[in-house]
């Protein structure tokens, strides 16, 4: 992160910082070589450092980990006791911390071709067939030829769909409703997170107005989908 980029960062509430760290960790844990955030968290009585692994907002608990000779040291912290958070190792995620003022740049070498996107959508369709015992088509709807950012967003959207559908398949009621109602999933990129169902087609719109920061989480997308079933 250069000096001028750093000057665009706003002061965020600590609870928002923790939520963003969770989003970064969720993105990285799916990579072949996860590059997880490194943090130092200070409470009113002590401090703890390590890899930011997970945050459970319901329990208000943060999990940090340090590795020594492949042996893990785990630390569980109550988020309500945090006084400050120091963050390292998130240079590529400045756009998430900037509320959209810092432009998102896809990682070098990570921009998929349209053929790769088609293969990824076919892979999701195969996973759905195995989980639901039903053929469900997955398509990406767009008007003009997607640019590099849009292709990267589409790749992220496919990963989001895969995670969301895996969660739905684990719930017997949601799985049954989805299997009965949906034969096609069609997603597009726009400025809102919305889901609608008509004639067997589940239309999913994902908000990329603030790059990937504004895209719904897997939990949020699951709730939107289940509300239509």
Image (tube, helix red, strand yellow):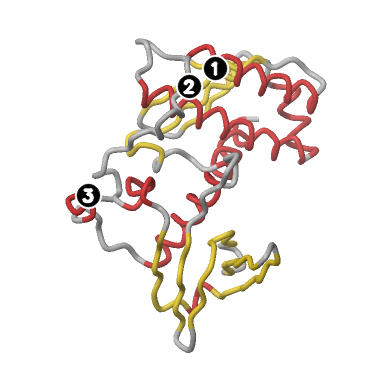
Mark 1 Cα shell of 10 Å, populated few (<14), some (14-19), many (≥20)? few
- In front of the other: 220 or 110: 110
Using residue 198 as the reference point, say whether residue 37 is left or right of it: left
Q: CA distance from mark 3 to mark 2?
A: 26 Å
Counting residues from the start of the chain, the first of labels 3 and 2 encountered is: 3
Q: Which residue carries the number 3 mark?
A: 5
x then y, percent, for residue 3: 19, 54
Quarter of the image with the C terminus is top right
Q: Which residue carries the number 1 mark?
A: 116
Q: Residue at x 56, y 75 (%)?
A: 78
Using residue 222 as the reference point, say whether residue 114 is left or right of it: left
The tag on residue 148 is: none
Mark 3 Cα shell of 10 Å, populated few (<14), some (14-19), many (≥20)? some
Q: Are marks 2 and 1 in contact (CB under 8 Å)?
A: yes
Question: Residue 95, relative to residue 143: is it above or below?
Answer: below
Q: Residue at x 30, y 48 (%)?
A: 99
Identify the secondary structure beneath mark 3: helix
Identify the secondary structure beneath mark 1: helix
Q: Which residue carries the number 2 mark?
A: 112
């Amino acid at each position: 992160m250069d000096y001028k980029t750093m000057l665009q960062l706003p002061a965020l509430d600590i609870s928002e910082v923790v939520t963003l760290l969770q989003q970064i960790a969720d993105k990285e844990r799916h990579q072949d070589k996860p590059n997880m955030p490194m943090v130092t968290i200070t409470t009113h009585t002590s401090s703890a450092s390590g890899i930011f692994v997970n945050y459970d907002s319901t329990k208000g608990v943060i999990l940090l980990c340090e590795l020594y000779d492949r042996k893990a040291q785990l630390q569980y912290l109550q988020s309500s006791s945090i006084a400050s958070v120091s963050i390292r190792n998130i240079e590529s995620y400045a756009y998430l911390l900037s509320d959209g003022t810092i432009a998102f740049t896809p990682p070098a070498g990570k921009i998929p071709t349209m053929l790769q996107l088609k293969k990824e959508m076919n892979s999701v369709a195969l996973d759905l067939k195995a989980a639901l015992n039903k053929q469900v088509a997955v398509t990406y709807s767009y008007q003009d030829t997607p640019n590099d950012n849009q292709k990267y967003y589409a790749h992220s959207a496919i990963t989001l769909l895969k995670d969301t559908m895996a969660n739905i398949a684990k719930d017997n009621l949601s799985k049954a409703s989805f299997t009965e109602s949906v034969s096609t999933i069609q997603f597009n990129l726009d400025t809102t997170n919305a889901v609608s169902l008509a004639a067997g087609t589940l239309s999913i719109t994902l908000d990329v107005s603030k790059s990937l920061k504004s895209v719904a989480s897997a939990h949020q997308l699951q709730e939107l989908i289940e509300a239509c079933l």
